[in-house]
Image: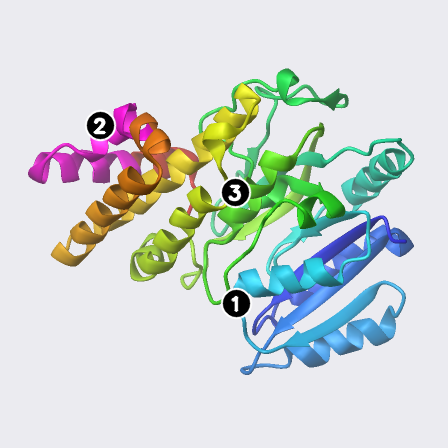
């Protein structure tokens, strides 16, 4: 049995996918690299995946499927995983090879425990194009490093330091049983991946190491503001699924509940601001529909978000409200460089 399965979703990724895989090969026989070709048509992604499998037959597995989108590729990776732990590495990102070896040592320790740890958290780095000083997302304010944690040991996460997909290594069996279902042909499903399984996590471990390098800055990247506005229907779909797949109101542990709720809140804020920045009657109607849907279907969450700072700010009427929200978003982007 492999220690760590790593899914690498690929779609027309020939230009950069091999770099991602090469960094993962540092894990040797402890890792299983599942290169999922998601129906690429514009380049030789599949051929590269098959060559990598031929060169490393005990480590790399090339999987071809009809196009299903990022979520479909991740779910295919999860279904094919044989490792005790599971991670997703996007094809344009990469990992620190030395730190990968350190993480595998820790996962080996977990594998020998009577009740293995559910979630290992590490830092990730924003490798943004044109930025010399790379921003590191760490979790020191919320978790003590190098010790076994329960949710009672977890504090409040710093602003902007949410548990994103790049930071997470889940125990595979727990992940499969968590109720996570990523929709096909939909962007932004990493928000579901980072949130839904948290309701099933009982134990955590934080390594304060800069493991994952998140490449950001291509003009066509899905997190660019203009792209998000164009794909607002997909953002809104994921936003609703965040509430549908997690019954956060009935999560017993209060810190666990608050962590999940904070993520639901910030994604709702992002969806709303994208609609505001789009500045059309159609997008305004979609924002209003989201909040009405939330009110009717998830009143507990709606009331908490609506009465909070963000909820009040998002409902300031007219041009002053739109100006404040747009200015706040631009300031946050300047401070945190999230796209």
Q: Which mark is residue 259?
A: none
Nearer the observer: mark 1 or 3; the answer is 1
| Quadrant of the rendered image containing residue 35 | bottom right
Q: Is residue 45 visible?
A: yes
Give the number of the disc on residue 132. 3
Image x and y of residue 105, in percent: 87, 38
Identify the main secondary structure in magenta. Answer: helix
Q: Which residue position is annotated with label 2?
A: 312
Tell me, yes or no, whether the highlighted magenta stretch contains residue 319: yes
Q: Earlier in the sequence, mark 1 or mark 3?
A: 1
Q: Secondary structure at mark 3?
A: loop
Residue 311 sits above or below residue 44 on the image: above
Element under disc 2? helix
Display colour scheme = rainbow
Q: CA distance from mark 1 to mark 3?
A: 32 Å
* Residue picked out by circle 1: 69
For image coordinates 71% across by 73% down, the residue present is 63
Badge 3 or badge 2: first in the primary sequence? 3
Q: Which residues are magenta?
A: 305-330
Task: Report the side of 19 relative to 220 (left or right).
Answer: right
Q: Residue at x 48, y 33 (%)?
A: 248
């Amino acid at each position: 049995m492999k220690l760590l399965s790593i899914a690498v979703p690929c779609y027309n990724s020939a230009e950069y996918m091999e770099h991602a895989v090469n960094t993962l090969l540092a894990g040797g026989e402890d890792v299983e690299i599942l290169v999922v070709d998601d129906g690429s048509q514009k380049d030789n992604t599949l051929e590269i995946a098959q060559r990598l499998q031929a060169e490393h037959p005990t480590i790399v597995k090339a999987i071809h499927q009809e196009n299903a989108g990022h979520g479909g590729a991740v779910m295919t990776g999860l279904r094919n995983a044989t490792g005790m732990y599971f991670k997703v590495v996007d094809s344009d990102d990469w990992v620190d090879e030395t730190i990968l070896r350190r993480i595998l040592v820790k996962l080996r320790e977990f594998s020998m425990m009577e009740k293995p740890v559910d979630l290992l958290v590490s830092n990730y780095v924003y490798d943004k194009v044109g930025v010399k000083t790379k921003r590191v997302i760490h979790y020191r304010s919320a978790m003590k490093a190098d010790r076994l944690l329960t949710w009672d040991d977890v504090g409040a996460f710093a602003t902007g330091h949410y548990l994103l997909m790049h930071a997470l290594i889940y125990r595979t069996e727990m992940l499969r049983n968590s109720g996570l279902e990523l929709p096909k042909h939909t962007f932004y499903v990493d928000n579901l991946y980072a949130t839904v399984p948290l309701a099933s996590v009982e134990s955590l471990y934080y390594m304060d190491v800069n493991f994952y390098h998140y490449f950001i800055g291509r003009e066509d990247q899905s997190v660019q503001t203009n792209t998000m506005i164009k794909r607002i229907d997909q953002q809104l779909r994921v936003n609703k699924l965040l509430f549908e797949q997690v019954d956060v109101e009935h999560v017993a542990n209060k810190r666990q509940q608050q962590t999940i709720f904070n993520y639901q809140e910030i994604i709702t804020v992002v969806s709303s601001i994208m609609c505001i920045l789009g500045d059309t009657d159609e997008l305004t109607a979609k924002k209003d529909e989201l909040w009405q849907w939330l009110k009717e279907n998830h009143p507990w969450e709606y009331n908490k978000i609506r009465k909070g700072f963000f909820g009040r700010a998002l409902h300031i009427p007219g041009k002053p409200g739109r100006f404040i929200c747009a200015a706040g978003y631009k300031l946050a982007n300047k401070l945190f460089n999230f796209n």
